[in-house]
Image (tube, helix red, strand yellow):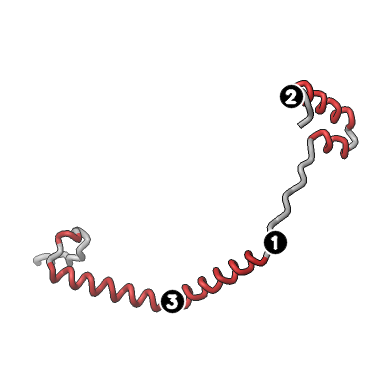
Amino acid sequence: MPSTPAIDTYEDVELHEFSSREWRVYDVGFLTGYALGQASLQAQLDQANRDADRYYAEMCRRPAPREKEHVSYAELCRRRGDYERAERNEAQLRELFGYLP
């Protein structure tokens, strides 16, 4: 019983090897598939664009966040009730820099 030849699915054919007729078939198939995919995803794309516009408008209405208050390590130690550590830290900074930053 002779074996039937395998069906050629163009898996081993490079695009630059196509003849002009094969290119037309490929091009029509690609454009048809693209159009079908675009039609089926257009509703999702429109919704994503509406969401993006809504989020952008919401962000434009919000005020800029305030900058956080900078508190020195020594001040944090004082707030915790550890006055000795605060004094040691400030003395160490004075020794390193000659002043308190």
The quadrant where residue 78 appears: top right
Q: Nearer the viewer, residue 27 or 64?
A: 64
Residue position marked by numbered label 2 in the rendering: 97
Q: Amino acid at mark 2?
A: Phe
Quote the CA–CA distance across marks 2 and 1: 38 Å
Q: Is residue 85 left or right of residue 4?
A: right
> Are dots 2 and 3 in contact, CB under 8 Å?
no
66 versus 7 height, above or below: above
**Which residue is depicted at the point 12% across and 66% down?**
19
Tell me which amino acid carries mark 3.
Gln
For the residues labelled 2 and 3, the Cα–Cα distance comes to 63 Å
Q: Residue at x 23, y 74 (%)?
A: 28
* Residue at the image point whose x is 19% and y is 58% from the top: 14
Q: Nearer the viewer, residue 56 or 42?
A: 56
Q: Is residue 70 above or below residue 8?
A: above
Numbered disc in front, either 1 or 3: 1
Q: CA distance from mark 1 to mark 3?
A: 34 Å
- The residue tagged 3 is 42
| Residue ID at (48%, 75%) | 46
